Amino acid sequence: MELAANRWFSSWFDTPYYHILYKNRGDEEAQEFMQNMVEFLKLPKGASILDLACGKGRHSVYLNELGYDVTGVDLSENSISYAKQFENDTLKFYTHCMCTPLKQKFDAVFNLFTSLGYFDEEKENLESIIAIKEEIKEGGWGVIDFMNVKKVIRELVPSEIKKVKGIDFKISRRVENGFILKDIKFEDEGEEYTFTEKVMALTLEKFRLYFFKAGIELVHTFGNYNLEPYDESTSDRLILVFR
């Protein structure tokens, strides 16, 4: 059956198959990135952090373990339901769309692991960045961790099959109308499923334009989770630090 929704991420992120396919995402790497980032930003223990598009909360939980007051929000009700088991006095999770600002302000807002650019319209990306600006306290920081689209497009693997938990995920990739698309097809228990991930190919130049329109100052760019300099040819990530 074909699962569809008004927004591709509304249905795909809420399925168990999304988490099965991506279950091997490295927690150790994610934790090292968070450690490096809070040290670089000199965030004192007890500072408030918003983890925007937090998924099941792996970054939020670790940041809370480091001594921070963390709020995690995500559009996926299933992901937030899962994350709520980790809640405590200084760790909370809510269902929320990033394109509208929360009323609360934070010492830092983190948007991690390519969690922007899902919208069809440019204005919605800009609205999300303006919302992030409104969620940052005076003197606070914003961090966007995005893929380096120039390297991704250059090294795009057109098709592959990934076998995870007995399911053969048939994956094909393409670039179309300024978006990087990934078609994912598989069968489970006699049912056929098809999903398409669609992420706008946002370059550093495009982010600079968004930041200019939003009145945001881009302070640093990094190319990986060790916070080494960004190089559009070789870097795996595009990490933007702004205020």
Image (cartoon, rainbow, N blue to C red):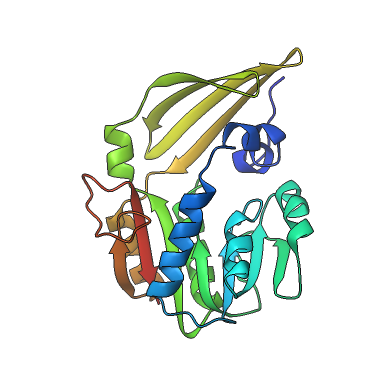
Q: Taking the image as drawn, is residue 79 in sight?
A: yes
* Residue 90 in picture, x, y percent from top left: 70, 75
Residue sitting at x 66%, y 40% = 6
Residue 167 located left or right of residue 231: right
Q: Is residue 121 above or below residue 182?
A: below
* Residue 41 in picture, x, y percent from top left: 41, 76
Of the 4 image quadrants, the one containing the C terminus is bottom left
* Residue 182 in picture, x, y percent from top left: 48, 30
* Residue 114 in picture, x, y percent from top left: 47, 50
Q: Is residue 125 above or below residue 242?
A: above
Residue occupying the far bottom of the picture: 138
Residue 236 located left or right of residue 134: left
Q: Is residue 241 above or below residue 152?
A: below
Q: Taking the image as drawn, is residue 112 in sight?
A: no
Residue sitting at x 67%, y 31% = 17
Indicate the quadrant where residue 220 lies.
Answer: bottom left
Indicate the quadrant where residue 205 lies.
Answer: bottom left
How many numbered marks have been drawn onto this rendered protein structure?
Answer: 0
Q: Is residue 207 above or below residue 69?
A: above
Viewer-proximal residue among 221 and 97? 221
Residue sitting at x 50%, y 23% = 171
